[in-house]
Image (spheres, rainbow, N blue to C red):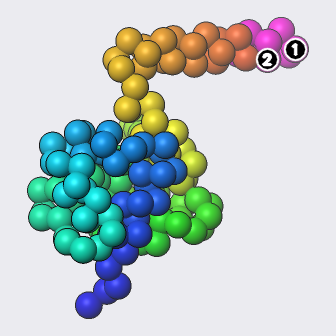
């Protein structure tokens, strides 16, 4: 059987994303004390909770369970790229590295109106860059 990394990954993902135990437990609909028991390894979460955690961090359950996420983000880029984390503009998948995945996780935790502001800002910056590149040509 493969080495289970779940306990360490729960703490790593929570702290990397700047989440409190209360935030995570509220998001996955369990008591904070229960989450604390999971994170310290005194209890193991059920399958639904594991799936809810994977959804929260936008990673696959396999990655959450078996990949050491405490290593440098570039070292887990291959694992991230092979998970379901990919965006598909024009039907060609672009794999996300660990840093991109964390950024997406942070983005997804924001309220919808803030997400919309970020999307608009990105489009604005992209159009400005394209205009600058066109004028330099």
The correct choice, above or below, for 52 with respect to 135 in the image is below
Q: Residue at x 26, y 90 (%)?
A: 1
Left or right: 57 in relation to 107: left
The correct choice, above or below, for 16 with respect to 47 in the image is above
Q: Residue at x 61, y 10 (%)?
A: 124
Judging depth in this view, the residue of 106 and 63 nearest the camera is 106
- Look at the numbered disc 2 and give the secondary structure of its residue: helix
- Rounded to the nearest angstrom, the CA distance separating label 1 from label 2 is 5 Å
Q: Residue at x 32, y 79 (%)?
A: 4
Q: Main secondary structure of the magenta part?
A: helix
Q: Which residue is mark 2?
A: 133
- The answer to whether one can see residue 99 in this image is yes
- The extreme front residue here reads 33
Q: Sort mark 1 into few (<14), some (14-19) or many (20+) by Cα contacts within 10 Å.
A: few
Left or right: 29 in relation to 105: left
Give residue 107's position: percent from left, percent from top: 45, 31
- The extreme right residue here reads 136
- The answer to whether one can see residue 82 in this image is no
Q: What's the magenta region? A: 130-137
Q: Residue at x 20, y 71 (%)?
A: 43
Q: Which residue is mark 1?
A: 136
Give residue 34's position: percent from left, percent from top: 19, 57
Residues at marks 1 and 2 touching, judged by CB atoms closer than 8 Å: yes
Judging depth in this view, the residue of 129 and 79 nearest the camera is 79
Give residue 51's position: percent from left, percent from top: 20, 55
Give residue 137's position: percent from left, percent from top: 85, 16
Residue 120 lies within the magenta run: no
């Amino acid at each position: 059987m493969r080495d289970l990394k779940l306990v360490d990954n729960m703490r790593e993902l929570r702290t990397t994303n700047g989440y409190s135990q209360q935030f995570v437990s509220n998001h996955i609909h369990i008591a904070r004390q229960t989450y604390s028991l999971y994170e310290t390894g005194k209890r193991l979460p059920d399958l639904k909770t594991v799936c809810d955690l994977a959804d929260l961090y936008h990673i696959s359950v396999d990655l959450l369970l078996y990949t050491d996420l405490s290593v440098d983000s570039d070292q887990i880029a291959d694992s991230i790229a092979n998970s379901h984390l990919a965006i598909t503009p024009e039907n060609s998948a672009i794999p996300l590295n660990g840093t991109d995945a964390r950024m997406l996780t942070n983005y997804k935790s924001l309220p919808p109106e803030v997400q919309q502001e970020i999307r608009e800002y990105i489009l604005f910056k992209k159009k400005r860059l394209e205009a600058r590149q066109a004028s330099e040509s």
